Image (cartoon, helix red, strand yellow):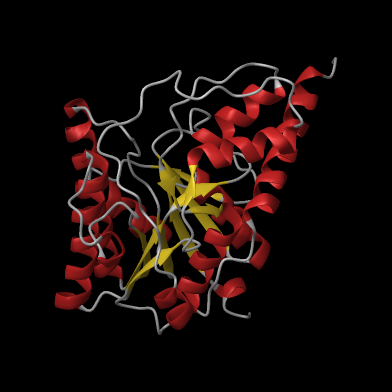
Amino acid sequence: MSYWPEAVVLVTGAAGFIGSHLAARLRVLGAQVHAVSRRPQRARHGEIWHQARLDDAADTARLFRSVRPDLLFHLAGEVTGSRGDEVVRATLESNVVGAVNVLSAAREHGVRTVFTGSIEEPRPGNDHAPPSSAYAMSKWAATGYARLYHRLWDLPVTVLRPSMVYGPAQPDTTKLVPYVTLSLLRGERPRLTRGAKLADWIYVDDVVDAFVLAGESDKAVGHTLDVGTGVRTAAHEIVERLYRITGAGTRPEFGTAPDRPHDITQVADIVPAADRLGWRPATELDEGLRRTVNWYASQECHEERPS
């Protein structure tokens, strides 16, 4: 499309998992990508890096005055699965205060916005189950503020709620797919729960497709859309598939780590995203896991290669 080569795009959280893949895709499309992180970063795909704290209103305002973006993808935030109260303040400040600062700056500059929610928010797909973590609560509040800015002040914002995202180059290697993959590739036995948790697993490139379409689509403005496959898959099945794909000799053992309390099965309703974005997931689970394993295997080979 001719839209992207003309676009000045701001991506917050661009050092994160989805954000880094999105920034790379936008550069391929020809956009001028301004990437934001709390810590210094080096350019990987020709993006322009900015260091800013989005929980600081003045810092956020300076960022927007400097970049003057046409389009904002807001993916920054404190991501944690902890059920402890020690993460309440961090998620509040990063995910709620940071979101309000970004929305305020976007409104001031008239910036079209694609906002990142969470599949763990109360929604029709989980019968409006209450948030089961400080992270889920903070994302629910942030989504509420995004809707408020659209309703009261006409900010053109679309909220996307990704489900369980996996794929190459996931920075947090304690997450199930990279953790199990790396353990099996290294001949180690991963410590696992019973693996009973059901989740909706979505390949990262498919998620990026949805974000790009949301950036282009007027039909999605003002809407909150799930981004997933609509299929529940148990964690133990993910592990078994990774075991088969890697051909590892060390068979995983389940039940050696405690289950996480208060987990709720989360599955995406993908019909609204199909209607508003023309988007559907394109990557089958085995294919996505195979691509992921191949990427980590290539990294392991590179690290072992003598200098």
Q: Is residue 191 left or right of residue 298?
A: left
Could one spot residue 57 in this view of the protein?
no
Tell me the residue at 26%/67% (across/down): 124
Tell me the residue at 42%/20% (across/down): 257
Quarter of the figure with the C terminus: top right
Q: Is residue 263 above or below residue 271?
A: above
Residue 157 sits in quarter: bottom left
Residue 78 sits in quarter: top left
Tell me the residue at 55%/71% (across/down): 280
Q: Is residue 295 above or below residue 30?
A: above
- The residue lying toward the viewer, choosing from 284 and 250, is 250
Q: Is residue 246 left or right of residue 43?
A: right
Tell me the residue at 29%/77% (across/down): 222
Could one spot residue 278 in this view of the protein?
yes
Indicate the position of residue 99 as horizontal and vertical percent values.
25, 53
Q: Is residue 266 left or right of residue 217?
A: left
Q: Residue furthest left?
A: 152
Residue 143 sits in quarter: bottom left
Indicate the position of residue 51 as horizontal and vertical percent values.
41, 40
Indicate the position of residue 216 as horizontal and vertical percent values.
49, 77
Q: Is residue 243 above or below residue 281?
A: above
